[in-house]
Image (tube, rainbow, N blue to C red):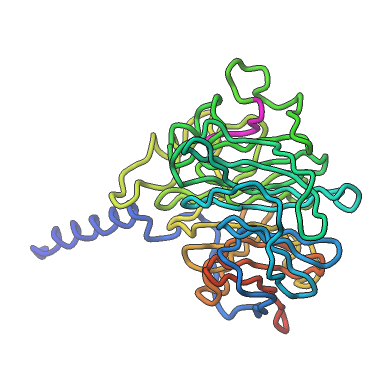
Amino acid sequence: MPSRRTPILTLLLLLLLASAALWGWWFTDDAPRSTGPDPVTPEVVVEGLEHPWGMAFLPDGGVLISERPGRLRRVVDGQLLDQPIQGLPPIAAVGQGGALDVALHPDYSKNGWIYLAYVAGEDGEVGTEVLRGRLQGNRMEDIEVLFRLLPKSDTGRHFGARLVFDRDNYLYVTLGDRGDRPRAQRLDDHAGAIIRLHDDGRIPKDNPFLDIPGAKPEIYSYGHRNIQGADLHPRTGELWTHEHGPQGGDELNLINKGANYGWPVITYGVNYGIGTQVGEGTAKPGMEQPLHYWDPSIAPSGMAFYTGDRYPDWNSDLFIGALKFQLLVRLELEGTKVVAEQRMLEGKLGRIRDVEQGPDGYLYLLTDQNDGRLVRLLPRTGT
């Protein structure tokens, strides 16, 4: 005779499974995930940075580092200069905003252009902007503002913003939805988009929405929530990005010209706190699927394909910093498929905001803290 407890136990099991699915208690992508002894040893290069956000390596061996409160700092001969770089316009350090990514022009050695993404205010509202200038001594000169997100708004969330040049010297700027979900689906609004510009801010004539009445001509793709990682694939030259999902549903995407990436209509995340569905589900015709996603969220920030020889087994692997779990993720790829994920340095450095490959072939990280650090990763024997 069946036990009277069986229906109750079955009901409890079903409720547990439903709750797990609802709250994202397990990893839902199909790539195997591994942890274990860290194969790298972190070495602190400099400390004393206030919430560093982005970095760029100079040909003379120095490093430019942005600090979110609104400064651009310089590391020379392994030492952080006391005086921030002068000459920048007013920067609005509001909520998640401030001084964001920094990048060098691909022909920097010839033209000296430095690019900075930052948040600027006007009439009580703020939005992401991009400038370029030249460093003269410790001062930025010849400053030109190349892009302003429009319309600005009064929220302090989801500004983006990574800067990437492709092989044809087009500049890509990643943006967030500004915490206002419907904006990501609007072509008359920069929010929630990736924009594409010439290096001097001109709009390319082959941008996908150039001839659509009312559309912002700078838009290259849209339907993004908040992109804080971007890099070119070393073999194909294609732009890859990652973006924050809501509660769960962080995405890794291959960016296609004119494509709609679905936010907030489709997502693998759920509404914060209550776990209810966002939008219409996880898929819809005409909207792109991610190459990979994380549930629960890792809060990704910073991203670099590795192309050096310091870690020979990792060539062409993808490295992503994580804010939430304070770790570094390594993704092993076969084409566009993620076949394995390794997690390292969990809880050892703090929130990892940026990941870059240095000219010496080592990976470098920035930690997002009041006393933030620039860290170099040294391979352990056998790595």
**Looking at this rendering, what residue extends furthest in the right direction?**
110
Residue 204 covered by magenta stretch: no
Circle count: 0
Tell which of 238 and 92 is nearer to you. Answer: 92
- Residue 165 image-quadrant placement: top right
**Looking at this rendering, what residue extends furthest in the bottom direction?**
381
Is residue 340 visible from the viewing direction of this image? no
- Residue 367 image-quadrant placement: bottom right
Q: Residue at x 56, y 31 (%)?
A: 150
Quadrant where the C terminus lies? bottom right
Q: Position of residue 294 (x, y in %)?
A: 49, 55
Residue 190 against residue 228 in the figure, above or below: above
Q: Residue at x 61, y 32 (%)?
A: 259
Tell which of 29 and 266 is nearer to you. Answer: 266
Q: Position of residue 166 (x, y in %)?
A: 77, 43
- Residue 187 image-quadrant placement: top right
Q: Position of residue 48 (x, y in %)?
A: 60, 73
- Is 338 left, or right, of 326 in this rendering? right
Q: Residue at x 55, y 70 (%)?
A: 34
Q: Residue at x 67, y 42 (%)?
A: 130
Residue 78 against residue 299 in the figure, above or below: below
Residue 122 against residue 340 in the figure, above or below: above
**Looking at this rendering, what residue extends furthest in the top direction?**
213
Q: What residue range appears in magenta?
A: 217-224
Q: Position of residue 134 (x, y in %)?
A: 80, 50
Residue 118 against residue 263 in the figure, above or below: below
Is residue 163 visible from the viewing direction of this image? yes
Quadrant where the N terminus lies? bottom left
- Is 361 left, or right, of 220 in this rendering? right
Tell which of 44 and 232 is nearer to you. Answer: 44
